[in-house]
Amino acid sequence: MSLTSSSADARLSPSGVSLPKVTIPALAEMKRQGKPISALTAYDYSTARLVDEAGIDLILVGDSLAMVVLGLENTLAVTVDEMLHHTRAVRRAVHRALVVADMPFGSYHGAIDEAVANAVRFIKEAGAEAVKIEGPRVDLVRGLVEAEIPVVAHLGLTPQSVHRMGGYRVQARTAEAALQLQADAFALAHAGAGAIVLEGVPREAAAAITTALPIPTIGIGAGPDCDGQILVFHDLVNLTFAPAAKFVRRYADASALFRSAIERYREDVEHRAFPSDTESYHLPQSARRLFQMDVRDDADEVVNRDAREEITQS
């Protein structure tokens, strides 16, 4: 089975290698082949373009933007319209990766038909290719799939349940809880979910679920045995202004890079070292001579006028 939906969907990597479009069926094929799935969050055009061009398989427009982009305390306050806004920006940048949009808190917690209507907006208005929902909502997954909307489920530490959980705590830490997690994962897979994010669960539980489950698992704080891994972009490059979680590996320090660049810019402005003459636009030579003559004439007129006024006043 090919991972390419059509030859027109392929995009070249920076090295010139053809990168086929990633789809939900392609993720299943990657699991079958034992090929690890890479995933990252993105919230705007520029970062999404960098992530896509780097060959990441799945881009999640996560509701984590509430904290890392909007500066909110948790994910609960972000709205459907805000998520749509950011999903549109990401979708404009992406050619290869599968674009998945987080459905925010409150957008799928009521009647199933209302949740489906909200999910349709992400597909129709924002260009998402799948939506992600948290919790073992089997009937909702079934309803979304019946409406032709691909679904990525999310189990374990579900951030939208922060109040119920009493904070961001590792889940499924007992044998009983791990068995329930596995049962929920199987129920979601049988309902039609295309993949499942496992967050903040013991490695052993995630490994067992990944081995037994027919669909891919994407881990975040779930150990190395999942079919794929996802991180928040801002965690990856140290733009969160907060201590990193245990499972985060920082691959770069964009915070230090940006801060240094901004401070150097401020210093150059204060010392009139920016912009330089070569960074400035200039009049053509002929226009410059005429302009300078006009400026001198204007200056002479001002001087002469002031002199006339002094004589008149005296």
Image (cartoon, rainbow, N blue to C red):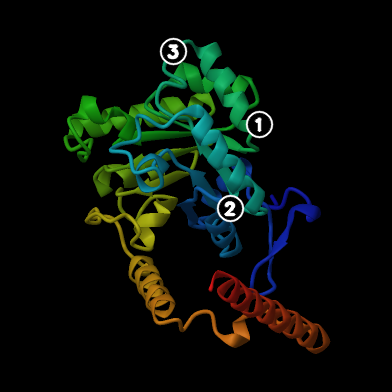
Q: Is residue 5 left or right of residue 97?
A: right
Q: Amino acid at mark 3?
A: Gly
Residue to which mark 2 is pinned:
45
Residue at x 73% of width, y 81% of height: 297
* Nearest to the observer: residue 255 or residue 133: 255
Q: x, y percentage for residue 5?
A: 73, 48
Residue at x 61% of width, y 26% of height: 121
Up/down of 193 relative to 291, above or below: above
Numbered tag placed on residue 110 in the rendering: 3
Q: Residues within 10 Å of mark 2 (few under 14, many from 20)?
A: some
Among numbered discs 3 and 1, the one appearing first in the sequence? 3
Up/down of 276 relative to 133, above or below: below
Identify the secondary structure beneath mark 3: loop
Q: x, y percentage for residue 43?
A: 50, 48
The part of the image, by quadrant, that contains residue 268 is bottom left
Mark 3–mark 2 distance (CA, rounded to whole Å): 32 Å
Q: Are marks 3 and 1 in contact (CB under 8 Å)?
A: no
* Nearest to the observer: residue 80 or residue 60: 80
* Nearest to the observer: residue 290 or residue 218: 290
* Nearest to the observer: residue 158 or residue 237: 237
Up/down of 94 relative to 201, above or below: below
Mark 1–mark 2 distance (CA, rounded to whole Å): 16 Å
Q: Is residue 220 left or right of residue 143?
A: left
Residue to which mark 1 is pinned:
125
Q: x, y percentage for residue 173?
A: 18, 38
